[in-house]
Every structure is written in C-alpha cells, then in structure tokens.
Image: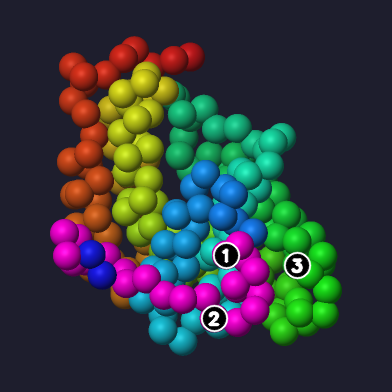
Amino acid sequence: MSTSMPWTAPRVEAHGEVEALATEWIAAYDQAEHLVRARDWLVHLASAATAEMRIAALTHDIERMFPGGPVLRHADGRWDDPDYLFPHMLRSAEVVTVWLGNLGPVAATVDRAEIRRLVGLHEVGGIDGADEVQAADSLSFLETLAGLTRDWVRSGVCSRSQAERKLRYMTDRVRTPAAAQYAAPLLAWALDQLPTESETEVPQR
C-alpha cells in the first residue's frame, strides 16, 4: 500500500496459471497498469473473489489493445453512452474468450463462460461478482488514469468540466459498500490533478 496514498489497495500476486498467463498477455497494453490495479482492487474489496472475477478484472478493457473497436467522443459524448459502452464490453468479452480458447487444456481450470459474463458487464455491474468487478474498475481508473484524464484536458481532447464529469461518473457508479469508502478520497485526489480552464487548449472536434 502506498505511503503517499494510504487509501489505495495493496498489490497482489497472480493466483493460478491462467491469471499468470493473463498478466503476461496484457503487459503489451499501454494501460496494463489500470488492469492490474483493477485486479488488486478487486481482491482488496472481495478477498474471496473467484479466479473468474480476478481474471475478468485483469482483462476487462483488453479490446482496446486491438484496432477497430468502438470510439467514444471525449469532447462532447456522454460517459454512460450505451452505444459505446455495450460494444466495448462485449468486444472485450469476445477477445478474452478467444484468448482463453487458445490456451489449451489449462483453460479448463476456469469457467470461460463466467469470465465472459463478467467482462461483458464490467461497465454496468450486476449480480454474482459483477458489481465488485465494476467497482474495482472504477477505483483503479481514479487511481491510475487520473493523469490520462488530466492530459485530455491539457491537450484539448475535452474540457475540464467534461473531464470532471468523467471522474465523477466513475465514482458515482460504484454500488458496493466496501468500495464506497475509497471512492471519495480517490475522486478528490483525481480532481486535484486536473488543470484549470486557463491552462487548457480549446477542445478538439
């Protein structure tokens, strides 16, 4: 656990061969740290998280590692736009399913359909672990991607107010009580990273 951010989750090691292989697979993704920390947050929030929950958290955004996915308009899009979120979730679920299918016999140690379900719900949550995976995604976003959100503003990808809406959206969608206590300090920290309007460029269209 960070000494400068004592309200963040401790790091954990991969548990099981499939999770270890998933850790290696996602390493090439430029936001791999977000995925790893989502897994860490999940374990912190739910110590009894199943292998399927852990792997889902670790791979939930993986479709973005491959070209051709859905595109969200950062400047003026809704952060809860279903026309973006559902294709993103389902494409990630499909990518993970294909990857698991290529692992061979080792994949039999996990429930591939359950991993697909959890990845396919990671933005919206749901029953039987899906809310926990979503909360872990949200907390990890606030911790690891606050800098990216700041850079959106600095480069003119979106306005400060739009970036703030993104951070608040990621916080407000958390439904699990165990995660709520961490969301507020993470949000405050992330908001502090945003530049002022005078430090930003005009948002790109």
Task: Find the distance from the CA under tag 3 to the CA under tag 1.
Answer: 13 Å
Q: Which residues are magenta?
A: 3-24
Q: Which residue is mark 2?
A: 15
Protein image colouring: rainbow
The tag on residue 182 is none
Q: Nearer the viewer, residue 178 or 55?
A: 55
Foreground disc of the pair 3, 1: 1
Where 150 sits versus 104, above or below? above
Asked which secondary structure carries label 3, the reply is helix
Sequence-wise first label, 2 or 1? 2
Q: Which residue is mark 3?
A: 100
Find residue 31 and report its horizontal and vertical position in percent.
49, 47
Q: Amino acid at mark 1?
A: Thr
Find residue 120 and report its horizontal and vertical position in percent.
64, 59
At horizontal 27% and vertical 65% (from top left) the residue drawn is 8
Report the magenta stretch's main SS. loop
